[in-house]
Image (cartoon, rainbow, N blue to C red):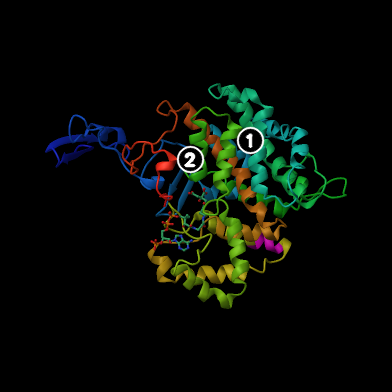
Amino acid sequence: MADTLTIIDNRTGKQYELAITDGTIRALDLRQIKADAEDFGLMAYDPAYMNTASCRSAITLIDGDKGILRYRGYPIEQLAEHSTFQEVAYLLLKGELPSEGEYKAWVNEITHHTYVHEYVNRAMDGFLYDAHMMGKLVTFLAALSTFYPKSKAVRDARTRDEHIVKIIAKMPTLAAWCFRHSTGRPYIYPDNSLSYCGNFLNMLFRMGEPKYDPDPVLERALDVLFILHADHEQNCSASAARAVGSSESDPYCSLAAAAAALYGPLHGGANEAVLRMLKQIGSVKNIPSFIEGCKDGSQRLMGFGHRVYKNYDPRAKIIKELAHQVFAVTGKNPYLDIALELEKIALDDEYFIKRKLYPNVDFYSGLIYQAMGFPVEMFPVLFAIPRAAGWLAQWQEMLVDPEQRIARPRQVYIGADVRDYVAIDKRGAGSAS
Ligand code: SDX
């Protein structure tokens, strides 16, 4: 049997053979199917890209039915157990695990680019103390493009490499300073003797002590959380990074667009929404009525469901186990019992079973972040820091892909037919619906 699709257009009786490659047909191959010579030709209509591959990628594989997640072929479970976030960032961007020498050079590069321009401090003070931290992070990611105008040379590999390192290095500093600004505490500068996550904790929580000593359990927990959040193929924010980057915008603005997409409660903002939901539920006894609210559409079980995973999100499993290690240090998050009971009830309920709704990466992560002392507004920022590595890997892959060009979807026009302008004194009462 040939790898082709035979299509008969019943409008004309014509038959077409379309090649099937990697389980897809090329949408452009549909254009030849015309009702008559004037016809533009067929397009595929796919709102929210439910069944459309926008690219060919070698970075991350998700198997939603089997609950599989692999970065460059390595199972997420093995990377979470054996790797570090900086090693995973290297893997996502370069395609291979680094040698010892490559890893040391990579860590050294990132460690020595953690400072951000002092003017960021001044601009930060222009925000209200309670401005949402994702609004600040998106702002300062884009603002960094003004400090590095040469980063626009996105077709030059060395330029890309230089700014990829800068962004990975500076994300924790920007995030920590957004946090310190919101608490009215002085900014803490990077300590290059600490690890990536140890230094992040230093810039967040150091007070009067001359040297910050990160708790090793929390430092490792953050590193594992960063590994788990590093990439997730063509999610909403990665698609935003690719789309904006396809116009040859610089990496800082491309990532600001991605961070803006991540901010939404249906995406990376879900971890914040989960904690607000658990607070709203308030007690295990209120869970049944909340579940009923999910069924009638008045509530949404945040942290549950996924466009791709129709099985348990493998990251959620690892985070759930990690929570117990963190709580041994911080004390148990009181909302854990509500979350565990919510999961238990939901997984036995036909509404969720029928729709294959399972806990996703956001369901338990917020419980850990809150126990570590982060305010809920910080949770999406903690998602954005590691995801910057994934966004950059997707952005870079798009730029070097010979098939890619500026992203510009088509549409099905359903608006008014041609009509003539009417002077305002000749128009009826406001006709706009
Ligand atoms: C992330 O794409 C990625 O990879 C994202 C991410 C990443 O790493 O980048 O994995 C990170 O964003 C995880 C998802 C975080 N979001 C949430 O937890 C928000 C709650 N979940 C949903 O809103 C929803 O499940 C989505 C947005 C995640 C997926 O939405 P889809 O695929 O468009 O599915 P849908 O909204 O069409 O839902 C299908 C049905 C609907 O019911 P019916 O119309 O068939 O009756 O399931 C219902 C929905 O109402 N449903 C839910 C639900 N999620 C879906 N009902 C109650 N609670 C939910 N959480």
Q: Residue furthest left?
A: 13
| Position above or below: 169 against 133 | above
**Callouts 1 and 2 close, C-beta under 8 Å:** no
Q: Which residue is mark 2?
A: 239
Q: Residues within 10 Å of mark 1 (few under 14, many from 20)?
A: some
Q: Residues within 10 Å of mark 2 (few under 14, many from 20)?
A: many
Q: Is residue 325 magenta?
A: yes
| Position above or below: 329 against 402 | below
Residue shown at the point (32%, 37%) measured from the top left: 418
Q: Is residue 192 visible?
A: no
Where in the figure is residue 311, as x and y percent of width and height? 43, 58
Identify the image quadrant of residue 38: top left
Q: Which residue is mark 1?
A: 142
Q: Residue furthest front?
A: 425
In the image, 292 versus 101, the foreground residue is 292
Left of 313 or right of it: where is 414?
left
Q: Nearer the viewer, mark 1 or mark 2?
A: 1
Q: Is residue 199 magenta?
A: no
Q: Where does the magenta region start and end? A: 324-328
Q: Earlier in the sequence, mark 1 or mark 2?
A: 1
Badge 1 marks a residue whose secondary structure is helix
Q: Identify which amino acid the numbered label 2 is placed on.
A: Ser
Disc number placed over residue 35 in the picture, else none = none
Specify whether tag 1 is near ligand 1 (CB below 8 Å).
no
Quadrant assignment for the N terminus: top left
In the image, 263 versus 123, the foreground residue is 123
